[in-house]
Amino acid sequence: MQSKDLLQLAEQFGSPLYVYDAEKIKSQYNRLTKAFSKVEKLRINYAMKALSNVAILELLRDMGSGLDTVSIQEVLLGLHAGYSPEKIFYTPNGVSLEEIEEVNAMGVQINIDNLSILEQFGAKHPNVPVCIRINPHVMAGGNTNISVGHIDSKFGISIHQLPHLVRIVENTKMNIVGIHMHTGSDILDIEVFLYAAEILFDAARNFKNLEFLDFGSGFKVPYKKDDIETDIEELGKKLSKRFNAFCTEYGKELTLIFEPGKFLVSEAGQFLVKVNVIKQTTSTVFAGIDSGFNHLIRPMLYGSQHHIENISNPKGKERFYSVVGYICETDTFANNRRIPEIKEGDILSFRNAGAYCYSMASNYNSRYKPAEVLWLEGQGHLIRAHETFEDLIKNQISLPLPAKV
Ligand SMILES: *Cc1c(COP(=O)(O)O)cnc(C)c1O
């Protein structure tokens, strides 16, 4: 996708606009399967919470991907996008027993992440194949909000509770077919990941009927120049070897599962916005855009730095800008960032806008959510229309108020 294509799309569909490059999603998917080609049974479940547009789900389904879901609504979307139930995994956190039972009845693989629900579910449904989520307490995350491995984390069953877990499984005679971990986003260090894998193998030795081991995700992708990214090829080499050795020891060819979100879709996305106003204060030049944290919350929520390009003037002289949104509270995308000279009306592109951008968008300030476009074989296809006023009021109910006296 070149700047002239993006400018044309912004012109055709209006701004703000999310654009996703199908080729990039495919090449990331292929990169991952190639890195693990030495593993006989490999399965990739796309973590759809990153970007849940149905057209994206269909694209990944077509490539052979499964789905990783965290809510019953995501399961319904996956089924709607044509995934068979066997291709869907359900790895929620803190949901009700009723929701787990409902998803199980749809034929989807369930994953339980706490001892209370495990015991209740096992007692009621001892024959259902269940996966359990272990927390190996390995710190892999960069940001405390997305790091889920620490000792007081709400995610997974602590590895220190393994004796209690084994007791519940023995008492209920439930059928454990898989073990799962997801140490959180941003794996910087492959050795740390391999260390966590050893903890998973140790846990796996306690169960005799396993069919798969699910290593979650957390692959890091570069957001700005000089960012480190997870070396997938190196991880593939080392983990494949270790996994295959474990299968030999276990006496069975297990399936290795990953559930990447960010890795598959982050870099494929760009968010196009228009500059409404340039405003100079005593110390700062603000570029005010026609969007805000209602459409892209990661910078305000996580302090994420999305690279910003001025695609209307890519060769312009660089100046310092603070890029801010139109929401009526502090809404900053970039502080004093060097960007080629910006004029009112220019189109800016935020990079890495594929993962956790549209899917976290809201209607705050009663703004419409943006449209989404998929760039496929040299053409832009609208995959979600801009919202309209109807969308804002469709579930709202006016009341007849008591008569004034
Ligand atoms: C969010 C999530 C993922 C995906 O994480 P990424 O960092 O986007 O790859 C995978 N597994 C589970 C259980 C998740 O909650």
Image (cartoon, grey):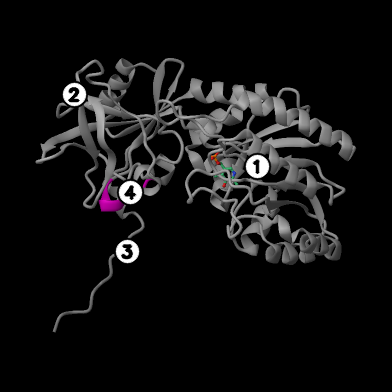
User: Over which residues does the magenta segment extend?
Assistant: 361-367
Picture coordinates of residue 43 (x, y %)? 69, 33
Quarter of the figure that contains the N terminus = top left
Q: Residue at x 67, y 40 (%)?
A: 215
| Real-space CA distance between mark 4 and mark 3, rounded to the nearest whole angstrom | 13 Å
Which sits in the foreground, 122 or 374?
A: 122
| Real-space CA distance between mark 1 and mark 4, rounded to the nearest whole angstrom | 30 Å
Q: Within the magenta stretch, is there residue 123?
A: no
Picture coordinates of residue 30 (x, y %)? 61, 22
Which sits in the foreground, 94 or 198?
A: 198
| Real-space CA distance between mark 1 and mark 2, rounded to the nearest whole angstrom | 47 Å
The answer to whether any part of residue 399 appears in the image is yes
Q: Which residue is mark 2?
A: 341
Is 67 placed left or right of 320 in the picture? right
Give the foreground label among 3 and 1. Answer: 1
For label 3, the SS is loop
Instruction: Point out the tag, 2 or 3, that comes first from the N-terminus.
Output: 2
The answer to whether any part of residue 86 appears in the image is no
**Callout 2–callout 3 Cβ contact below 8 Å:** no
Q: Which residue is mark 1?
A: 88
